[in-house]
Amino acid sequence: MERFWKLAFCRFAQLWIYVFECRYIGSAYGFTFKFAVFATIFVNVIALLIALGLTSKIKFQNTLKAVYFLPYMLGTLIVGFIFNFIFGNLLPDLGKALHWSFLTTNILGTSHAWIGILIVTIWQGLAFNTLIYMSGLQSVSPELYEAASLDGAGAWKKFWRITFPLIAPFFTINLVLSVKGYLMVFDQIMAMTSGGPGNSTTSISVLIYTQGFQGSQFAIQSANGVVLFLIVAGVSLFQLNVLNKREDRIEN
C-alpha cells in the first residue's frame, strides 16, 4: 500500500511539473492573459463612453439603445461565423475594389488573427458593460452636476470628481466580470480560427478542449483546468479586494 501511494504521488507530481514546464501550455497562458488585458481595457473604456453618450440629451436615444444592445442578443457562435464571412470575403473584396492592400488579406489567416477576434469580442461585449454603466450613471443625482456647474467645474472635472467616484461599484462589477470572462475566452476563437493559424490564437480554454477532449491528454488538461480555475478565482478575489478598498477610500 505504501508503494502504491508513493507511485501515485510521483505520477501526480510529474503531471503538474509537465503542466508548468510545457511550452505550448505556457504559450496558451501568455496569449490568454494578453487577450484578457486588451479586451478588458477596450471594452470598459468604450462602454463607458457609449453610456455617457446614451445618458446625455441626444436624439433617437431609444433607437440607439436598441442598436447597441443587438450584439448581446445574438449567440456568440453566430456572431463569430458572421464575422468570419466578413473578414474572409466582404473586406477582401472591398479592399480589392478600393485598392487598399491592407484589406485584401483575411486577417484571421495572418499573425494578427488575434486582433480580428479581439474586435469581435469587444463589439459583442459592449452591450452588457454599457447597460451596467448606464444603470450607474442614472443613479447620479442631477443636482450634483448643477452645483458643480455653479462652482465653475468643467465637463472633465465633473466626470472625475462626481461621475466616476459615484459609479465606482459599477466599474468594479464590470471589471471583475470582464477579466473573468476573457480569461476563459472560448466561443469566439472556436468559431473564427479554432486556435489557428498554428497555435497563435489558442487560449487556455481552447487548449483544454482540443487536447483534453479531442486529443489524448485528458489527465494533463484536467490539471490544467484546475490551474485555470485557481488563476481566475485568485485574480477575481484580488480585484474585488483592491477595488473595494478603493471604493471605501472614495466614500470616506
Image (cartoon, grey):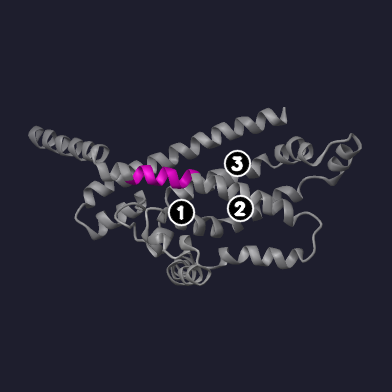
Looking at the image, which residue sits at the far front? 99
Residue type, label 3: Thr
Q: For the magenta stretch, what is the residue range?
A: 28-37
State the CA–CA distance, disc 1 to disc 2: 20 Å
Q: Categorize mark 3 by other alpha carbons within 10 Å: few (<14), some (14-19), many (20+).
A: some
Q: Residue at x 56, y 44 (%)?
A: 175
Residue type, label 1: Ile
Looking at the image, which residue sits at the far right? 150
**Could you tell me which quadrant the N terminus lies in?**
top left
Residue type, label 2: Asn
- Residue of label 1: 115
Q: Looking at the picture, how far across and down is residue 163, in whole percent?
A: 74, 41
Say which label, 1 or 2, has the lower sequence index. 1
**Magenta stretch secondary structure, dominant:** helix
- Residue of label 3: 172
- Residue of label 2: 129
* Residue 187 visible from this viewpoint: no
On the rendered structure, is 148 left or right of 55?
right
Question: In the rendered view, would you say 69 is above or below 2?
Answer: below
In the foreground, 219 or 50: 50
On the rendered structure, is 126 left or right of 208?
right
Q: SS at mark 2?
A: helix
In the foreground, 167 or 119: 119
Q: Looking at the picture, how far across and down is residue 8, in whole percent?
A: 15, 38
**Could you tell me which quadrant the C terminus lies in?**
top right
Question: In the rendered view, would you say 236 is above or below 54?
Answer: above
Q: SS at mark 1?
A: helix
Foreground: disc 1 or disc 2: 1
Say which label, 2 or 3, has the lower sequence index. 2
State the CA–CA distance, disc 1 to disc 3: 26 Å
On the rendered structure, is 133 left or right of 223?
right
